[in-house]
Image (tube, grey):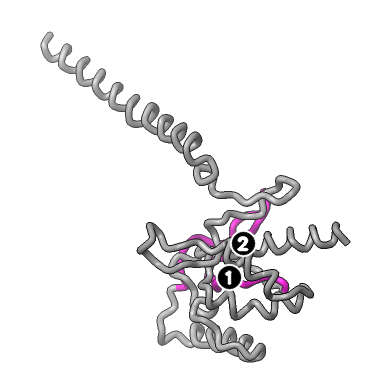
Amino acid sequence: MVFIQETIRAIRMILLLWLLTAIIYPLAMLGFGQFVFPTSANGSVVLNIDAQPIGSSLIGQVFTSDKYFHGRPSAVRYSQGRKAKPTGISGGSNLAPSNPELKTRIIEQATQFQDENIQPAADLIYISGSGLDPHISLKAARQQLTRVAQIRGIKENEIIPLINKYTDSRFLGIFGEPGVNVLRLNYALDLQEINRQQNQ
């Protein structure tokens, strides 16, 4: 009889702990996140003027057009859009420094910048460890400023305030370096161009 009572008590404890840890606590954290940090809790998704998602400000994307600032190179290729499927997972290329493929890729990228008379910042050549870095350094942004301004037919002074606006400061004021969020900057440039065309 005592054994049965202890078994029932143990089952009740297991069910109570399961209820607390698997249902109540996750739902409470979900509700807290949605209430206090709704944008972050939903992936920091950036929407265009038609309220369509164009990416996340937390994940780097590939911009190939010269009218855009280019982000860090990545071994990961994420497709955009609701129907598109991601073509990679987070992580670097895992190529050793002695790997000829790595050397070839770096030389090709450096040559492209040399054609533009640019001595590129390291983050424009070297892949980030996670492959997801959405930022570039202020130096890397400045090195691309002339190209973007010329292609868009605007003055560099019209872009500089946007670079400053979308530069994220050091984490907690001490960790890391300031970085320019490439997706947000490029989208702001597109909005600026749309507004300029509408006002003409």
- Residue 141 percent coordinates (x, y): 58, 74
Q: Position of residue 194 (x, y in %)?
A: 79, 59
Tell me: residue 169, above or below residue 114.
above
Tell me the element at label 1. Answer: loop
Residue 68 part of the magenta segment: yes
Q: Which residue is mark 1?
A: 71
Q: Which residues are magenta?
A: 67-93
C-alpha distance separating marks 1 and 2: 8 Å
Q: Amino acid at mark 2?
A: Leu
The residue type indicated by label 1 comes to Gly
Between 55 and 14, which is closer to the camera in this rendering? 55
Mark 1 residue crowding within 10 angstroms, few (<14) / some (14–19) / many (20+): many
Tell me residue 151's x, y (percent).
76, 76
Of the two numbered discs 1 and 2 on the same chain, state the one appearing first in sequence: 1
Identify which residue is drawn at 52% across, 81% down: 121
141 or 91: nearer the viewer: 141
Residue placed at 61% from the left, 86% from the top?
113
Q: Residue at x 19, y 17 (%)?
A: 7
- Quarter of the picture containing the C terminus is bottom right
Question: Going by the picture, which residue comes out furthest to the left?
Answer: 2
Residue 186 at x, y percent in the picture: 66, 64
Query: Splitting the image into 4 quarters, where does residue 119 fall?
Result: bottom right
Q: Residues within 10 Å of mark 2 (few under 14, many from 20)?
A: many
Foreground of the two, 139 or 134: 139
Q: Of residues 84 and 169, which is closer to you in this image?
A: 169
Residue pointed to by mark 2:
183
Is disc 1 in contact with disc 2, using a CB cutoff of under 8 Å?
yes
Q: Is residue 199 magenta?
A: no
- Using the rendered view, name the quadrant where residue 197 is placed: bottom right
Residue at image point 58% right, 70% down: 71
Dot 2 falls on a residue whose secondary structure is helix
